[in-house]
Image: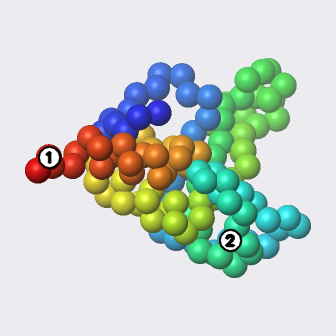
Amino acid sequence: MPLSCSCYNDNPDFYVYPPADYSEMPVFKRRKRCASCETLIDAGAIVAKFTRDRCPRSGVEEAIYGDGPNIPLADQYQCETCADLYFSLVDLGFECVMPDENMRALVREYAETFSASY
């Protein structure tokens, strides 16, 4: 998705809750990949953790989880480098930056779009 200062989706498949700050990668049985650049992240590394959930899709899911966006999905993590780029883009006012987008490509797009021509 290209950079945008606003976003609108009337029927999202899932909801992403961005982090307010960096956190530490928890210990899992296996290392997780960065959602953006797909590098492996070690336990204890500095990351950005994105929590996600979605609405029920069937009557059975509604009976189990209730109504609303509360079926938990797996968290997504960004390595420190991609998290730095993510937080920079958000600070610049871009609202629809998803954790699984390539942060380096988005920053490249920003530089091409908004750099001054000399």
> Which kind of residue does numbered mark 2 sit on?
Met
Q: From mark 1 to mark 2, how far is it between C-alphas?
A: 41 Å
Sequence-wise first label, 1 or 2: 2
Q: How many neighbours does mark 2 have within 10 angstroms: few (below 14), some (14-19), or many (20 or more)?
A: many
> How many circles with numbers are drawn on the protein?
2
The type of colouring in the image is rainbow
Image coords of residue 3 (percent x, y):
37, 39
Image coords of residue 21 (percent x, y):
47, 68
Image coords of residue 84 (percent x, y):
45, 65
Which residue is under mark 1? Answer: 117
Dot label at residue 25:
2
User: Closer to the camera, 71 or 38?
Assistant: 38
Q: How many neighbours does mark 1 have within 10 angstroms: few (below 14), some (14-19), or many (20 or more)?
A: few
User: Closer to the camera, 17 or 65?
Assistant: 17
On the question of residue 95 being in view, the answer is no
Q: Residue at x 46, y 46 (%)?
A: 105
Q: Is residue 88 left or right of residue 118?
A: right
